[in-house]
Image (spheres, rainbow, N blue to C red):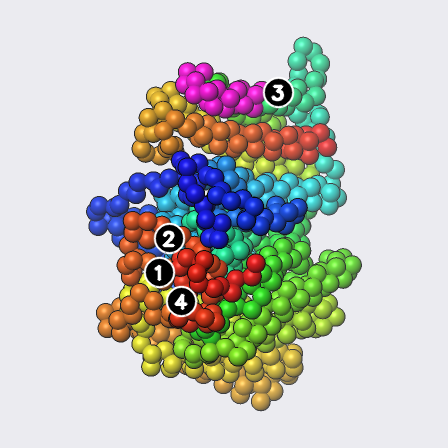
């Protein structure tokens, strides 16, 4: 890439203040100067996905607020019987802990990706995937438990039918996101391990030689999925 | 180190050129092509094909309305199915797909000076998922019970109940699945369009040098990426209601003497979700039309667009405002009356940026060197039609006027004028304008004149009387109107007249289709830039443009897209890639 110098910068009448910011942003080639196409695309996709989760959660809140039948108490429904006492929300707490931890390992993977440390990046990504898979596994356990207790999408023993509908729909949609994330984490980790990004190997999810950017893009998606879980946790389980 | 001459202010490329992988086989060149131009043609052809199905359905409806009782095969159930499929196909599968998938794919990379969309493979997938969505939609015509007859808004609870055609059969399931597929496919394309405009422009192509066509399509795509999620969620929830028996939208309800299993759902919630998508959708269709028509008018009046910056800001303002007006479709739904007050206010505020645009189009024409070519005719027809539809929008935006008019043919006339006929006129104009670039040949002029006059005058003869019929109180969505007291003799004659005009206008579209196919081989040779236009797509080395668009080197942009009739210039147009320092420009500083 060529370096840029201006032959005579005093001649360039550059606008100051807000106008300058607007002019920079609207300048040619790229609106976001150091953002690659893939990263920009992921950000915009996540914005769109935010609206999907937003609509799901708002619909759930509408259902919960407008129902005339009592809403099942989440801390009782999601309690586990451990050592002779009911521990409310214990499984959800562990799930949340696991998922948030996976964000940590993901961030470390991105860090090592910048240093082009093939081995550590791949290991941390696989660790992230393992934590994600654990989360999905625990979610499957939670679903099974609720189903055996009689919770169905169309009804449950304790109150408003919308409880089960919203629960399965929202956690199912989020769990699908996590599952897709796990699959792609493994794919990208394999590519890192094999050194595809060092040699700029052609194919899918490619990069220019020596760029580990796909790790970071993967990380964006993963952190987003975690962030969405925090909202689901707050609005569905803690409310 | 590279020197930059300040006068031209074109910095060096930020990223070096990457190697292009040209397709080798017939399949990857024409079928599974990753070239945005081929994808655009695939999108356009599919959308046109399904659009003709919707046209045919409108004929069947007009047969029933104009000559009630004459055609036995049009039962009330069939009539509702025709209405539903006509509306859904026209709004989503034709207009949205054609403007964004068709024109977006073709024009964005060419106009911003890019080799292709940023992710061509994802772009290709977008088309194939769209095609799948269309096929699922078509499949519902052949499913047991036929397509859904829930009305194009698919309101629950009736959409999934026994009395509605397709409600307890396959119709509604296929409809919702098809919409979900469409949204997935669109998202893949839409992300491409947005990133290409933001991050994929050539040197010198600042945002404020983009042709308004790109601004319109870009803003509409951003809106679609934020509005379609609401429809996606609504479709998923209704699908669960129908398939699993959940009660998101279904209240406790008795059907044919039977208490249904549903209870506690909110039908109004669906309406909110639907219109949170549905109103932006109007502008998703309108904004590309606004953008394209600005370029048509400027090019064919040989004059720079009046108030370019204001045009851009008006597009953005309309896009933003359209997200806070959705409930004006729900004045009669029983929501809180104060909401009506709020939404009426925001609705009327939209008239301000819209009016700015209309004034600017007219001021662009003022003292221009107007060439009444066919694209220009369509552009002028658009302005008239849009103003017309917009004015009846002022009626319907006010709660007290809307309530009595809401369920009448007045509404049908209004939205057909403003989001049916007006954008379609722009699509026609745009096709006459860019066809020479796509095929290298001109469309036939005489057939074009015929097509324009029959379509334009015919559309008025259809929809103008319809306002009147609506004002006297004739309800919409009724399959049978004969026994009603408001259906006076004259109203009935008017209805027959409208039907005959509808057949005529539909016939003109067949002529247009013939013209499209015939001119590929027999049209007059167009050359590279028949309209003497400034934008980059007319400056390509080959016509039609080859894979990679611009040959060896990408063009460098030195000026805005509207340097027409610049005083002191040799020609009456200066392409965007002509260096600026020695030829004056009218670009605002």
Q: In this picture, is B297 found above or below B31?
A: below
Residue toward you, B197 or B138: B197
Q: CA distance from mark 1 to mark 3?
A: 58 Å
B494 vs B21, left or right, is: right
Residue toward you, B19 or A45: B19
Residue B448 horizontal/vertical position (percent):
36, 78
Can you name the residue that lies furthest to the top here?
A: A83
Q: In this picture, is B531 found above or below B33?
A: below
Can you name the residue that lies furthest to the right here?
A: B338
Q: Looking at the rendered structure, which numbered label has been put on residue B555?
A: 2
Q: CA distance from mark 2 to mark 1?
A: 9 Å
Contact between labelled residues 1 and 2, with CB atoms less than 8 Å apart: yes
Give the SS element for disc 4. loop
Subunit that carries the residue with mark 1: B
Contact between labelled residues 2 and 4, with CB atoms less than 8 Å apart: no
Label 3 crowd (10 A; few <14 / some 14-19 / many >=20) = few
Contact between labelled residues 3 and 1, with CB atoms less than 8 Å apart: no
Subunit that carries the residue with mark 4: B
Which residue: 25% across, 46% down? B23
- In the rendered structure, which segment of residues is drawn in magenta? A101-120
Label 1 crowd (10 A; few <14 / some 14-19 / many >=20) = many
Disc 3 designates what residue?
Answer: A97
Q: Is residue B275 in view?
A: no
Picture quadrant where residue A209 is located: top left
Q: In this picture, is B227 found above or below A71?
A: below
Which residue: 59% across, 44% down? A51
Q: Looking at the rendered structure, which numbered label has been put on residue B533?
A: 4
Same chain for labels 3 and 4? Say yes or no: no
């Amino acid at each position: 890439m060529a370096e840029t110098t201006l032959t005579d910068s005093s001649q360039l009448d550059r606008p100051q203040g807000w106008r300058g910011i607007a002019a920079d942003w609207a300048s040619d080639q790229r609106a976001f100067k150091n953002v690659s196409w893939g990263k920009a695309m992921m950000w915009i996709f996540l914005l769109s996905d935010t609206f999907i989760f937003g609509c799901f959660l708002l619909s759930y809140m509408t259902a919960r607020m407008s129902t005339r039948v009592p809403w099942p108490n989440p801390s009782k429904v999601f309690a586990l019987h451990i050592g002779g006492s009911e521990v409310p929300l214990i499984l959800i707490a562990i799930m949340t802990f696991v998922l948030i931890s996976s964000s940590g390992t993901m961030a470390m993977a991105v860090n090592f990706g910048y240093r082009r440390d093939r081995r550590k990046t791949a290991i941390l990504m696989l660790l992230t995937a393992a934590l994600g898979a654990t989360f999905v596994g625990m979610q499957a356990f939670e679903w099974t438990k609720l189903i055996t207790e009689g919770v169905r999408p169309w009804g449950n023993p304790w109150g408003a039918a919308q409880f089960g509908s919203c629960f399965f729909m929202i956690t199912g949609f989020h769990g699908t996101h996590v599952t897709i994330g796990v699959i792609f984490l493994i794919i990208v980790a394999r590519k890192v391990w094999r050194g595809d990004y060092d040699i700029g190997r052609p194919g899918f999810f490619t990069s220019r030689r020596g760029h580990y950017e796909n790790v970071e893009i993967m990380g964006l998606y993963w952190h987003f999925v975690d962030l969405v879980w925090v909202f689901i946790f707050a609005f569905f389980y803690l409310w | 180190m590279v020197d930059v001459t300040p006068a031209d202010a074109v910095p060096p490329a930020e990223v070096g050129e990457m190697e292009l992988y040209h397709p080798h086989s017939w399949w990857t060149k024409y079928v599974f092509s990753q070239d945005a131009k081929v994808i655009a043609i695939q999108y356009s052809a599919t959308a046109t094909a399904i659009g003709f199905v919707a046209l045919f359905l409108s004929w069947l409806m007009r047969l029933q309305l104009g000559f009630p009782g004459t055609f036995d095969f049009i039962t009330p159930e069939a009539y509702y199915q025709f209405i539903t499929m006509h509306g859904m196909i026209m709004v989503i599968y034709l207009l949205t797909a054609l403007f964004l998938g068709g024109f977006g794919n073709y024009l964005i990379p060419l106009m911003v000076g890019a080799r292709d969309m940023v992710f061509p493979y994802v772009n290709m997938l977008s088309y194939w998922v769209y095609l799948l969505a269309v096929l699922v939609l078509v499949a519902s015509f052949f499913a047991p019970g036929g397509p859904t007859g829930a009305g194009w808004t698919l309101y629950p609870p009736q959409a999934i109940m026994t009395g509605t055609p397709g409600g307890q059969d396959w119709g509604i399931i296929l409809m919702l699945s098809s919409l979900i597929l469409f949204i997935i496919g669109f998202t893949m394309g839409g992300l491409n369009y947005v990133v290409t405009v933001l991050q994929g422009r050539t040197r010198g192509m600042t945002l404020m040098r983009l042709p308004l066509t790109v601004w319109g399509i870009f803003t509409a795509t951003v809106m679609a990426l934020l509005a379609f999620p609401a429809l996606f969620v609504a479709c998923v929830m209704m699908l669960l209601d129908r398939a699993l028996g959940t009660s998101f939208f279904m209240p406790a309800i008795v059907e044919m003497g039977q208490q249904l299993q549903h209870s506690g759902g909110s039908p109004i919630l669906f309406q909110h979700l639907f219109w949170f998508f549905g109103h932006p959708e109007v502008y998703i269709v309108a904004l590309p039309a606004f953008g394209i028509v600005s370029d048509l008018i400027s090019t064919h009046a040989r004059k720079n667009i009046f108030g370019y910056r204001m045009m851009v800001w008006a597009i953005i303002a309309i896009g933003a405002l359209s997200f806070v007006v959705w409930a004006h479709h729900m004045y009669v739904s029983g929501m809180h009356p104060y909401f009506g007050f709020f939404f009426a206010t925001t609705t009327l505020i939209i008239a301000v940026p819209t009016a700015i645009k209309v004034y600017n189009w007219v001021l662009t024409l003022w003292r221009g060197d107007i060439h009444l070519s066919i694209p220009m005719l369509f552009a002028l027809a658009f302005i008239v039609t849009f103003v017309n539809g917009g004015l009846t929008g002022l009626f319907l935006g006010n709660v007290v006027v809307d309530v009595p008019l809401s369920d009448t043919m007045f509404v049908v006339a209004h939205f057909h004028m403003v989001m049916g006929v007006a954008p379609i006129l722009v699509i026609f104009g745009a096709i006459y304008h860019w066809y020479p670039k796509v095929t290298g040949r001109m469309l036939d002029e005489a057939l074009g004149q015929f097509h324009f006059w029959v379509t334009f005058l015919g559309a008025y003869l259809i929809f103008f009387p319809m306002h009147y019929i609506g004002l006297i109180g004739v309800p919409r969505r009724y399959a049978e109107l004969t026994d009603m007291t408001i259906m006076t003799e004259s109203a009935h004659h008017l209805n027959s007249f409208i039907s005959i005009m509808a057949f005529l206008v539909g016939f003109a579209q067949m002529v247009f289709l013939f013209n499209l196919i015939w001119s590929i081989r027999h049209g007059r040779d167009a050359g590279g830039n028949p309209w003497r236009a400034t934008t980059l797509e007319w400056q390509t080395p080959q016509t039609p443009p080859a894979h990679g668009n611009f040959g060896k080197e990408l063009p460098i942009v030195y000026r805005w897209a509207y340097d027409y009739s610049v005083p002191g210039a040799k020609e009456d147009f200066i392409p965007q890639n002509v260096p600026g320092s020695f030829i004056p420009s009218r670009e605002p500083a």
